[in-house]
Amino acid sequence: MYAVIATGGKQYKVAEGDIIRVEKLNAEDGAKVTFDTVVLVNNDKDVLVGDKVASSKVEATVLKTAKAKKVTVYKYKPKKGFHKKNGHRQPFTEVKIEAIKA
């Protein structure tokens, strides 16, 4: 059984026991979170989409909140002497999928 959930402007295919990284959530480490925006549920018999998954939920536990590796952004314009170096570390939340309730 798997489900497709939407959070942080992205969609993720998840199954029970999976560990995924999502955009940063306002939850502490060890807290339980519920994803209400379920797009699709595939139980081994059929695929549920649309109004059939309106009441479905995916429960997860927050493992950690951290930042990803640094991405270096370097801009320059040739023959003009313009150089600009910048870095960015995107925050994320790592969650473990506990249950899919369809």
Image (cartoon, rainbow, N blue to C red):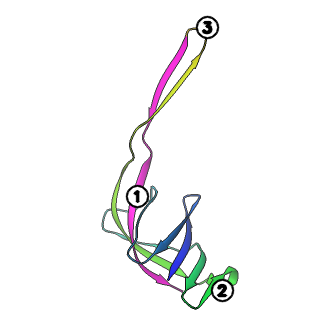
Dominant SS of magenta comes to strand
Per the model, the C-alpha gap separating discs 2 and 1 is 29 Å
Q: Quadrant of residue 43?
A: bottom right
Q: Please report whichever mark, 2 or 1, sits nearer to the chain's N-terminal start.
A: 2
Q: Quadrant of residue 40?
A: bottom right
Residue numbers of the magenta segment: 82-102
Q: Residues within 10 Å of mark 2 (few under 14, many from 20)?
A: few
Residue 34 locus on image (x, y percent): 46, 74
Residue 93 locus on image (x, y percent): 40, 58
Tell me the residue that label 2 is attached to: 52
* Callout 3 secondary element: loop
* Callout 1 secondary element: strand
Asked if residue 38 is positioned above or below residue 84 in the image, the reply reads below
Closest to the camera, between mark 2 and mark 3, is 3
Tell me the residue that label 1 is attached to: 93
Residue 79: mark in rendering: 3
Q: Residue at x 47, y 82 (%)?
A: 100
Asked if residue 61 is positioned above or below residue 25 in the image, the reply reads below
Which quadrant holds the C terminus? Answer: bottom right
Q: Residues within 10 Å of mark 1 (few under 14, many from 20)?
A: many
Q: Please report whichever mark, 2 or 3, sits nearer to the chain's N-terminal start.
A: 2
Three-letter code for the amino acid on which mark 2 is drawn: Lys
Q: Please report whichever mark, 1 or 3, sits nearer to the chain's N-terminal start.
A: 3
Asked if residue 4 is positioned above or below residue 26 in the image, the reply reads below
Residue 88 locus on image (x, y percent): 45, 37
Three-letter code for the amino acid on which mark 1 is drawn: Thr
Residue 65 magenta? no
Residue 86 magenta? yes
